[in-house]
Amino acid sequence: MAFPFGGAAACPACYGFERLPANIFIERAASPEQRAQVAAVLEQARGRVAAFYDSADTQPRVLVCVSDDCYRRIRSAGSRGNALLDLALQLSPRGIDPVIAAHELSHIELHHRIGRIRHLMGVIPAWFDEGVAVVVSDDRRYLMPPDAADRCLVRSDEALPSGMFEWRREMGRNDNRQLYAKAACRVADWMRAKGGATTVTRLVARVAGGTSFGEAYAAER
């Protein structure tokens, strides 16, 4: 009751979900057309994540709502999707989209590679986690296309939120969507200068091995 997302991830059937192939759980009322759409969207999203990380090491439970009532039962209104550690993700009716799904799957892949305990300790700054997810999902709301000379929409040298609670607080103050663009720009610039996606996977491996983010980030610079 206090944490319905966790409850739904543990027992999808208890919250009105039915299982599809590939560890997808969809609202029981979903039509055949909606079920086919969800399967196609998740296939595309997983492809983006696997292409970026060179593999996809996780198979989280994916809870998909096709109605707002369903999503309100497992999550407060407003978000399109959310990840739970490296265990599960949820998608709202507005989140049934390869970009949104890939964004959340990127979080799950990164959290898995870091390790659950290290993720909970906050060893990866929120701005980096979110920036990578925008790049992986190729979210054109916050980045120019991959073939652009400069992918940045908003470049900033200011300190970006490191903690997830701090990130959410900043997002909630003014619905500051520019925060995503700033984080994505910083990650995209860093990746372009240092070798692309392999730069991220090397950093993640170092942090998973016990190196601090600051040290690993500086080593790649």
Image (cartoon, helix red, strand yellow):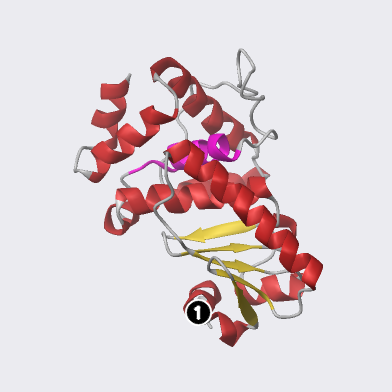
User: Residue 3, relative to residue 101: is it above or below?
Assistant: below
Residue 37 visible from this viewpoint = yes
Q: Which residues are magenta?
A: 124-137
Q: Which quadrant would residue 198 be assigned to in this image?
A: top left
| Residue 87, image x, y percentages | 43, 64
With 71 as the anchor, is 127 left or right in this view? left
| Residue 34, image x, y percentages | 77, 66
| Residue 145, image x, y percentages | 66, 25
Q: Residue at x 65, y 37 (%)?
A: 139
Q: Which quadrant would residue 210 be assigned to in this image?
A: top left
User: Residue 99, relative to residue 76: is it above or below?
Assistant: above
Q: Which residue is mark 1?
A: 7
With 173 as the anchor, is 127 left or right in this view? left
User: Residue 129, relative to residue 105: is it above or below?
Assistant: above
Q: Residue at x 61, y 21 (%)?
A: 151
Q: Residue at x 20, y 38 (%)?
A: 211
Give the prevailing secondary structure in the magenta stretch: helix
Membership of 130 in magenta stretch: yes
Mark 1 Cα shell of 10 Å, populated few (<14), some (14-19), many (≥20): some
Q: Residue at x 76, y 74 (%)?
A: 30
Residue 169 visible from this viewpoint = no
| Residue 155, image x, y percentages | 57, 21
Residue furthest out toward the left: 210
Tag 1: amino acid: Gly
Membership of 3 in magenta stretch: no
With 67 as the anchor, is 206 left or right in this view? left
- The answer to which of 47 and 13 lies nearer the viewer is 47
Which corner quadrant holds the C terminus?
A: top left
SS of the residue under disc 1? helix
